[in-house]
Image (cartoon, helix red, strand yellow):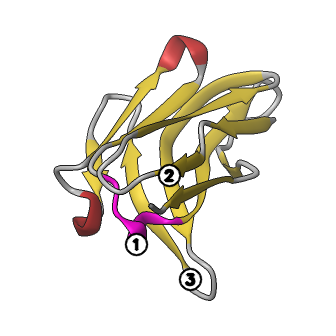
Amino acid sequence: VQLQACGGGLVQPGGSLRLSCAASGTIASINTMGWYRQAPGKQRDLVARVTTEGTRYYADFVKGRFTISRDNAKNTVYLQMNSLKPEDTAVYYCNADVRVVVDTRYHNRWGQGTLVTVSS
């Protein structure tokens, strides 16, 4: 199973970006999907997550600015980021609990990360 994230880049303060992360492989089902971020010299923090049923959680520092969504048919999770601030600069990682066809358990998987830089 692989998680492929894309959509990062350089954006000015106040701008927007949309990240996407697609899971591929012999996937039977995916439970919670989410996004984390890690700024230089800091720990990796949860940004947002969404369950299969659509229940969403947001970290306080992105509430009202970021929106997480998913397309279960495409095994893809998105993160719409609006009103970006310089402090949002970080590597963003997608994360998912995935069950493959030959397994009965869910395993936590990470994507490779995509860099978001907010700067004028």
**Amino acid at pointer 1:** Glu
In primary-sequence order, the first of circles 1 and 3 is: 3
Name the residue at 23% across, 49% down.
Answer: 65
Is residue 31 found left or right of 53 in the rendered image? right
Q: Secondary structure at mark 1?
A: helix
| 119 in relation to 105, above or below | below
* Residue that numbered label 2 is attached to: 35
Residue 87 percent location from the top left of the image: 40, 72
Where residue 99 appears, as percent x and y from the top left, is: 68, 35
Quarter of the image that includes the C terminus: bottom left
Q: Nearer the viewer, residue 44 or 19?
A: 19
Residue shown at 37% from the left, 41% from the top: 16
Q: Of residues 38 and 84, which is closer to you in this image?
A: 84
Q: Which mark is residue 113?
A: none
Question: Reading the chain from its start, which is encountered first: label 1 or label 2?
Answer: 2
In this picture, which residue range is highlighted in magenta?
Answer: 84-89
**Mark 3, residues whose alpha carbon is within 10 Å: few (<14), some, or many (≥20)?**
few
- Pointer 2 with pointer 3, Cβ within 8 A: no
Three-letter amino acid code at the position of disc 3? Gln
Residue extending farthest to the front is 120
- Crowding at mark 2 (Cα within 10 Å: few <14, some 14-19, many 20+): many
Task: Give the side of residue 117 with respect to residue 105, left or right.
Answer: left
Q: Is residue 30 above or below residue 101?
A: below
Amino acid type of disc 2?
Trp
Q: Residue at x 28, y 43 (%)?
A: 56
Query: Can you tell which mark lies on residue 87?
Result: 1
Residue bearing mark 3: 43
Of residues 88 and 49, the one nearer the viewer is 88
Q: Is residue 51 above or below residue 73?
A: below
Q: CA distance from mark 2 to mark 3?
A: 14 Å
Q: Tell me how far mark 1 sits from mark 2, CA to CA.
A: 16 Å
